[in-house]
Image (cartoon, rainbow, N blue to C red):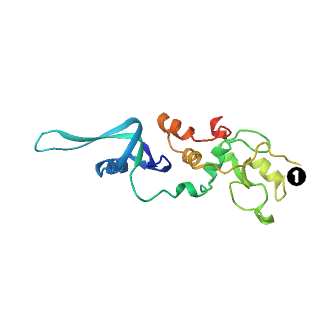
């Protein structure tokens, strides 16, 4: 189970383990929390009171700190799992929905023809359509795109990372995802 770590302004920073979150709680580094408690960690017993220490870890934690998050300034890293999830496992040419193993990263403008490996030049394609298009531009292969590529926002990227996301976490992330995003579909 992962915890969504935010900076104090509410920008996602990382997915962290409940143990990492417990360290933040113990160091008094948590500014605020959202969502339900996802795990209660128990520690030792206090000599003076005989009570056991415990930390209730929430699904979303905002961390105090003077170092601002730079994650929001960067373009999310491109990977096949995130690309296929962004495109909902749908081939951009034939519209078929395929299993991960049947999909490929398709460069709209082939790399051999000056295309770059970026979110705006890559779409999901089935092996058949990718092979048919080959080293051509879509219009040269008489193939049209059924949807356009886009660069995911930081909130979308946190969803695309393929984690098991709790309802509270998903609601928080989706609230900042544009309504036009395929992740709302």
Give the percent coordinates (x, y) of residue 131: 79, 53
* Residue 174 vs residue 40, the one in the foreground: 174
Q: Dot 1, crowdedness within 10 Å: few (<14), some or many (≥20)? A: few
* Residue 128 shown left or right of residue 49 in the figure: right
62 relative position to 171: left or right: left
Q: Does residue 100 show up?
A: no
Front residue of 106/147: it is 147
The single residue placed furthest to the left in the displayed view is 48
* In the image: residue 178, left or right of residue 26: right
Residue 98: quadrant of the picture: top right
Q: Which residue is mark 1?
A: 139
- Percent coordinates x, y for residue 168 in the rendering: 47, 35
SS at mark 1 in the image: loop
Name the image quarter holding the N terminus.
top left
Task: Please indicate, yes or no, whether residue 138 appears anywhere in the rendered image.
Answer: yes
From the viewer's perspective, is 31 left or right of 106?
Answer: left
- The quarter in which the C terminus is drawn is top right
Residue 183 vertical placement versus 151 (above, below): above
Location of residue 97 in the rendering, given as x and y in whole percent from the top left corner: 71, 38
How many discs mark residues in the rendered view?
1
Q: Position of residue 12 (x, y in %)?
A: 50, 48
Up/down of 164 relative to 24, above or below: above
Q: Which residue is drawn at the image coordinates 66% and 51% (left, top)?
A: 151
Q: Residue at x 68, y 39 (%)?
A: 180
């Amino acid at each position: 189970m992962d915890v969504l770590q935010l900076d104090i302004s509410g920008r996602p920073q990382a997915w962290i383990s409940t143990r990492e979150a417990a360290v933040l709680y113990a160091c008094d580094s948590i500014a605020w929390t959202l969502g339900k408690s996802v795990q209660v960690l128990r520690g030792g017993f206090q000599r003076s009171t005989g009570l056991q220490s415990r930390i209730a870890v929430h699904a979303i934690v905002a961390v105090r700190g003077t170092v601002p998050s730079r994650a929001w300034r960067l373009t999310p890293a491109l990977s096949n799992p995130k690309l296929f999830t962004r495109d909902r496992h749908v081939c951009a040419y034939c519209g078929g929905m395929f299993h991960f193993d049947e999909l490929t990263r398709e460069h709209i403008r082939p790399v051999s023809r000056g295309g770059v490996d970026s979110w705006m030049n890559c779409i999901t394609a089935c092996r058949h359509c990718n092979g048919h298009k080959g080293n051509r531009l879509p219009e040269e292969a008489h193939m049209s795109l059924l949807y356009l590529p886009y660069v995911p926002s930081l909130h979308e990227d946190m969803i695309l990372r393929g984690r098991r996301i709790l309802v509270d976490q998903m609601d928080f992330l989706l609230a900042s995802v544009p309504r036009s995003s395929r992740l709302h579909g």
